[in-house]
Image: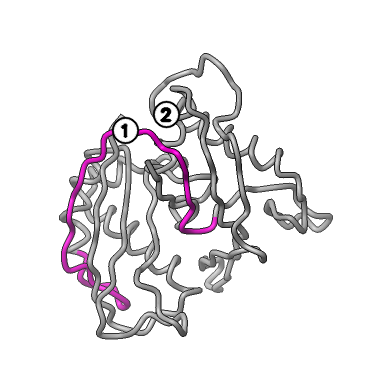
């Protein structure tokens, strides 16, 4: 298994608050993809085969500054997609918030992962409340770490099956240990427009440290998470991880 990565440098045309950054970046990436019809066809699936991290370095006041440059990273298992994005991100000139100046492409072969760290909130859907509002896994609403572990495993297993048509020989969790790294839930906000009215949606997630099991299947799932995200909503910035060898 190979992961394809783009490290991008972006110039900001306006100040961007941290809470708005996921929405702005996800829409920039998406609009860049659809600049090319062939590239747009690649990502029509509701299950995204890419993930991305937020701007860095972060500012102390949580506001990324106009006229400064920041970096962000996109990863995918899809070489065709990364080859398209390498050029399309730079060609996306009409965005009012940012302009990608350059992209550095890298291929990452599978390596042994001793620890996974989520750099962006890991989103896991839970039940709906009595009013039909979607709830997300958190210590407040759920608190069941085993349930969280199972959902994360099942999500990655589903992605492996979808993208590689590969069934696992055994279904035990790829996670040996899992640790919550935040005291309060973390949020990703994105905006939708319905009937010409703008609505802000809040996704609630958590920062996690995971120690994967050492067997072949567990390591394959851990590595896959680096490319397609851990948990849900990777196309909106959820579950972007770093792996330590």
Q: Where in the figure is residue 50, as x and y percent of width and height?
A: 37, 46
Secondary element under disc 1, as helix, strand or loop, is loop
Q: Which residue is mark 2?
A: 220
Which quarter of the rendered picture does the C terminus lie within?
top left
Any mark on residue 196, and which?
none
Q: Is 180 drawn above or below residue 49 in the view shown?
A: below
Q: CA distance from mark 1 to mark 2?
A: 8 Å
Secondary structure under tag 2 reads helix
Q: Earlier in the sequence, mark 1 or mark 2?
A: 1
Residue underneath mark 1: 110
Asked if the residue at tag 2 contacts the one at tag 1, i.e. Cβ–Cβ closer than 8 Å, the answer is yes
Q: Quadrant of residue 203?
A: bottom right
User: Quick one: label 1, few (<14), some, or many (20+) residues within 10 Å?
Assistant: some
Residue name at image x 22 percent, y 60 percent: 89
Q: Nearer the viewer, residue 8 or 193?
A: 8
In this view, the residue in front, 177 or 93, is 177
Mark 2 crowd level (few <14, some 14–19, many ≥20, 10 Å Cα)? many
Residue at the spot 26% in from the left edge and 42% down from the top edge: 4
Q: Which residues are magenta?
A: 92-121
- The reply to whether residue 44 is visible in this rendering is no
Q: Position of residue 109 (x, y in %)?
A: 26, 34
Q: For this view, does 229 lie left or right of residue 71?
A: right
């Amino acid at each position: 298994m190979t992961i394809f990565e783009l490290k991008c440098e972006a110039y900001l045309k306006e100040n961007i608050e941290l809470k708005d950054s996921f929405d702005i970046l996800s829409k920039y990436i998406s609009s860049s993809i659809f600049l090319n019809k062939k590239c747009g066809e690649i990502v029509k699936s509701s299950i995204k085969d890419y993930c991305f991290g937020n701007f860095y370095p972060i500012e102390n006041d949580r506001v990324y500054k106009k006229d400064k440059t920041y970096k962000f990273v996109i990863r995918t298992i899809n070489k065709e997609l990364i080859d398209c994005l390498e050029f399309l991100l730079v060609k996306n000139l009409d965005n009012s918030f940012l302009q990608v100046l350059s992209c550095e492409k890298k291929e990452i072969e599978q390596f042994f992962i001793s620890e996974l760290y989520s750099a962006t909130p890991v989103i896991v859907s839970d039940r709906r409340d009595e009013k039909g509002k979607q709830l997300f896994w958190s210590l407040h609403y759920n608190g069941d770490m085993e349930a969280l572990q199972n959902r994360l495993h099942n999500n990655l297993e589903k992605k492996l099956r979808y993208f590689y048509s590969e069934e696992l020989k055994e279904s035990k969790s790829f996670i040996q240990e899992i640790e919550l790294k935040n005291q309060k839930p973390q949020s990703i906000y994105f905006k939708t427009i319905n009937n010409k009215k703008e609505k802000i949606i809040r996704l609630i997630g958590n920062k996690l440290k995971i120690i994967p099991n050492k067997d072949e299947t567990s390591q394959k799932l851990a590595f896959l998470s680096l490319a397609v995200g851990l948990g849900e909503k990777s196309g909106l910035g959820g579950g972007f991880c770093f792996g330590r060898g």
